[in-house]
Amino acid sequence: MCSQQAEPSIITMTEPVIWLTDHKNQESRMGSKAANLARLHHQGLPVPEGFCIPSDVIENADWTEPVLEAYRRLVASRNDRVAVRSSALAEDLAEASFAGQYETFLNIEGEAALLDAIRQCQASDQAARVAGYKAHHEMTATASNVSVLVQRMVAADMAGVLFTSDPVSGSSDRIVIEAVPNVAEELVSGTVTPAHIVLDRGTKSIAEAENLSTLPAPLAAVETWSRLLDLALQIEAVFTTPQDIEWAYQDGQFWILQSRPISVRPAAIDMSRLTRANIGEVLPGVVTPLTISTFLHALQASEAEDQDVKPSEMLTIVEGRAYIDVQLLWNSYDHIVGLRPPSVLKKGLGCDVTGREAELAAASPPIGISGNTLKSAYVWLELVTRRWVKPRIERLLTQEIQPTLDQLNARSLQTLTQDDIWQQVQQLLKLTNQAFSAHMQSSFIALCAYAIAHDRLAIVAGEQNADRLMSAASANQTANAAALHHHFGVLAKRVQASPALDQLFRSTTEDDLLPALQADAEGQRLLAEIEQSAHVLGNRGVQEFELNTPRWAEDPRLLIATLRALLLSGALETGSGQSHDAEAVTLDSCLQRVSPVQRLLVRHIYQTFVAYAHTREQTKSVLMTCFSELRRHYLQLATMLQQSAALTEADDIFFLEISELNALLTQQVEPSKLTSRIPERRRAHERYTSQGAAAGFSADPDAQVLIGTAVSGGQVTGRARVVSNPALAALENGDILIAEYTDPGWTPLFLIASAVVTEIGGILSHTGTLARELNKPAVFSIAGATRLIQDGQRITVDGSSGKIYLHPD
């Protein structure tokens, strides 16, 4: 037995053999593979009987006799063969799996063969391939001391591997299985083509299947895979992270041979292919599982089967944040006559591809003459006529989606059953699919029209004039600014007309203002008016695609705080209707030197852009209403699930994926099998939020001039305020807002700020449109702006040229 010293975590290394059944306090000596199997055995999962020889024993003691005694005990009853595998201290980790680096010996029979296999396993730590692997992972020469695991050999009828989330896409909805007849060694070594099965986590049904004919017919049944999936989900619950599981099947019994974290790592992803441009405004923060699975469900359902580049395929999640594949983004705007993809990516979406154009163009797959013709014809037919896509979108919004949303919104959820609410969620998802489709179509045509019109205007009038004209074209396309000015103006006059309220707003701190208003009769009447305004603006909010964040209608404190800031700053009195852009430019002045035919064509495409910019904003508004309604329904389901003890906390629901929520509500699985994943997901969410986005930035930290995308014209000099959370911002009138991103939930701050600078965004972003509506100079897509610009620093924002000037203290 091992002796225990005063410090209980320190173990004296005296046991030459550790049985998987007697692993307590010995896991640090066993290596990861053996320790993981011991944990699973302890949890009652089917692990072949066996023992481990710790590395310290092999290196420092005469171990042969204790090992042979253990071997005789293991095979005494059946004279079985054994499997001998390495179990390194640094093996089978999420960040370094050492997959295939060490030796494995199967079907070992006899004592001499056993001792030889153990020595070769232990010596494999010195192999050249292991040394190279360690060097790549910056490990020391002794970082993976090798213990050896000896187990009863499973004479498998079938064997394979299972991933509890798709190792390619990362989707935990997809359980990926590969299987071969007999033992799995040929499979993991890559020398055979396996049967490939994908199961849906929630329903356990087969979503994909290939090469099933290579397996014995009785073993290929869905019931077999369902049993394996049950085991896999239990294993995942033990380790709380997605697992790569090696298994074997013998005489109707599954055996677990290995389990390790799936070793798909963000560091291994080619970040140079990815951008946060555009998607960083849509999904700016770390997304919860329910949000991203709902988002992808709607996005995928909105895609056409013959679409050459599907938007969902562009999306990648790295450490909880959404990124877009730049190559796929380029491809979607390639092969269109008269359109340059760089104009769409850089100007329209804020993704600067300068210097990479040739690389991206070379990698763009050809789609053939017919493909080019059809794609170009689709775009140009709509650019010229506006008679096909736009009318269909408008009918869909006004006659189908919005009326149904209004009906659902009018229904109280309190009297409905859980099943009724879930049925309404399915209806909402269909509406969301339709709204996504309309939004993607209108965005695509708007961006095509923008790029074509901009490039032609730049040729005849210069880049800066083209920027100004196209920026002005997308201003005043929504009612956001007008609605905000109206509601805040009415509320401000209401406060200013009452000396008591005016004094309350000016003398009370932001934290104390809501209770002070609630305690005052006039304050209560004002709160009722604020609540009405919140409901008018109420489908919007900060990070509004994130289902776990409240909308303005749910929590009017942001509107109260903004009203207070506006009253103190005087921003409403100074107004925002005066344009900052001193050099106004008109379409007529730009086109006066071109031929009548070219003038007619450019003017028409320009007008198409104006029309589609408006439609794009309409579809976004309807889409956000869909997400707001989904949130309302999810919250009611969360309350019911918490009351039935299926969930511990109501917001646990946001840490389940939509397929898992379906399985929970339809009682397809035990609740604990799903909810056991929530704590680790919460920890991951907190960890990813605290560490920031994975992508770096390329701006020069010593530069005195930062260059981004000119979004809204004009020039302002003022004090920079770096803001990460609009609810906590302390802006004063004239301050310049500096943020990683802004979305419509930041709109109240736009009324106070004199200019806006962000790390993410393009001319056609929704908040870019808002900046132009409010005539606020804005420069977007400045990588690292929140780090390069110091809070309180004096800067000048030139929204016409896209330059930020940093002034010395």
Image (cartoon, rainbow, N blue to C red):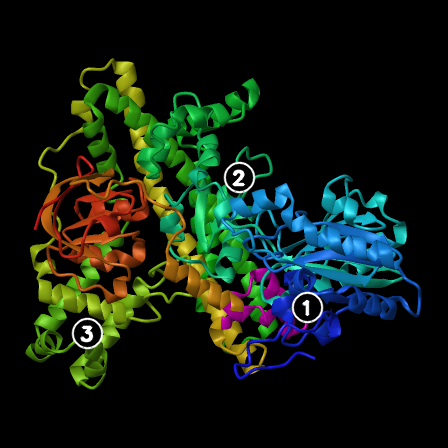
Query: Is 605 contained in the magenta span?
Result: no
Which quadrant of the rendered structure holds the N terminus? Answer: bottom right
Which residue appears at 53% of the width and 26% of the height? 365
Left-right relation of 667 to 214? left
Is residue 375 among what the camera can see? yes
Residue highlighted by disc 1: 234
Q: Which residues are magenta?
A: 652-679
Q: Amino acid at mark 3?
A: Glu
As drawn, the label of residue 510 is 3
As drawn, the label of residue 310 is 2
Q: Amino acid at mark 2?
A: Lys
In depth, the one of 612 and 337 nearer the eye is 337
- The rendered magenta stretch, by its main secondary structure, is classed as helix
Point out residue 26 in the picture as x, y percentages from the top left corner.
64, 72
Mark with earlier residue (2, 3): 2
* Quarter location, residue 333: top left
